[in-house]
Image (cartoon, helix red, strand yellow):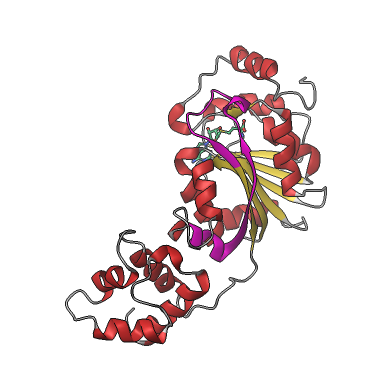
Amino acid sequence: MMNRGDISTPRRTKEIIQRHGFSFKKSLGQNFLIDQNILAKIIDAAGLDKTKGALEIGPGIGALTEKLAQQAGKVTAVEIDQRLLPILEEVLEPYPHVNVVHGDVLKLHLQELFEQRFKDVSGVSVVANLPYYVTTPILMKLLEEGLPLEHIVVMIQKEVAERMAASPGGKEYGSLSIAVQYYSEPELVCVVPHTVFIPQPNVESAVIRLSVRKEPPVSVEDEDFFFDVVHASFAQRRKTIANNLKSRFFPKEGRERLEQLLAEAGIEPSRRAETLSLQEYAVLSNVFYAAGLK
Ligand code: SAM
């Protein structure tokens, strides 16, 4: 049986990988964590205890899963790569409150999984070192499905983490910042050096914590339309908001009606999309909605 708590050391990781004849697949974003300090930071940021559940996406050989097992009352880990299942079975054998689901998280029915696995816990958080090739689709699925989540603590590409947490005014702020901040309060936990992974990724990484909101911070008439207006506003970043909105909503008309609606929303036509707050986008989309532009 495995020694508890030490599978994430570089030596142990290499031993397990070699013994199972495992080879990394770049196409599955396989960069495994081999640093105890980073694992501890991720775990601390999730604020778990034995009354809580944790959902991990992509357990790899179980480095983070093992730490989650030691903190949380129930753990479910979803892994796409069948070759990792025997390794996970071995590593997680001492932890009967952990189950591994083989599958693609993007295709899983998560509401169903929550009902089956997390009925009797007091809260659930997602904790993961995500595969970078699907970071945004995974996070948007978690946020948009209205799952009863407390926190999402994830290792992702640093550049993506900065965009998610960005405030209006900077070049990182865009439709991703708005979507993430509509559903959660993001906070950058730490920037992470390449050396904590095997193999080392060729992009910078960071841990971000999204505290999932119970209600959105703004009131919008129609959520899909709100995001439609946001995307249209950012269509071409070098253009003014008026020009972007004109192309999308008034392609054949003059500017009069658009300028009237922008005035009603209290937005100067010469502003650029990255200067508008979430609240301003909510007002803008509600004014457009009331004008029948959906
Ligand atoms: N948690 C491990 C660690 O930190 O050492 C491994 C993290 S590695 C960055 C990403 C993991 O996600 C890999 O094990 C990979 O096989 C898995 N994965 C990739 N795409 C996935 C998907 N669509 N659904 C579930 N797991 C996926």
Extreme residue toward the left, this view: 252
Q: How many labels does the image show?
A: 0
Q: Position of residue 94 (x, y in %)?
A: 78, 30
Q: Residue at 76% x, 44% y: name it.
A: 44
Q: Which of 201 and 128 is in front in this view?
A: 201
Q: In which quarter of the image is residue 216?
A: bottom right
Please state, as top left, top right, bottom left or bottom right, where the N terminus lies in the image.
top right
Direction from residue 154 to residue 2 in the image, left or right: right
Q: Residue at 65% x, 28% y: name it.
A: 88
Would you say residue 180 sits in the magenta stretch?
yes
Q: Residue at 77% x, 34% y: name it.
A: 95
Q: Residue at 55% x, 29% y: name it.
A: 31
Direction from residue 248 to residue 42 in the image, left or right: right
Direction from residue 282 to residue 191 in the image, left or right: right
Q: What stretch is highlighted in magenta?
A: 177-206
Q: In which quarter of the image is residue 194?
A: top right
Q: Position of residue 198 (x, y in %)?
A: 58, 23
Direction from residue 265 to residue 215 in the image, left or right: right
Please state, as top left, top right, bottom left or bottom right, where the C terminus lies in the image.
bottom left
Would you say residue 185 sits in the magenta stretch?
yes
Does the rendering let one see residue 106? no
Quadrant of ligand 1: it is: top right
Extreme residue toward the right, this view: 50
Q: Where is residue 57 in the image (x, y as percent from the top left)?
A: 59, 42
Residue 170, above or below 270: above
Residue 247, above or below 45: below
Q: Where is residue 109 in the image (x, y as percent from the top left)?
A: 53, 53
Does the rendering let one see residue 100? yes
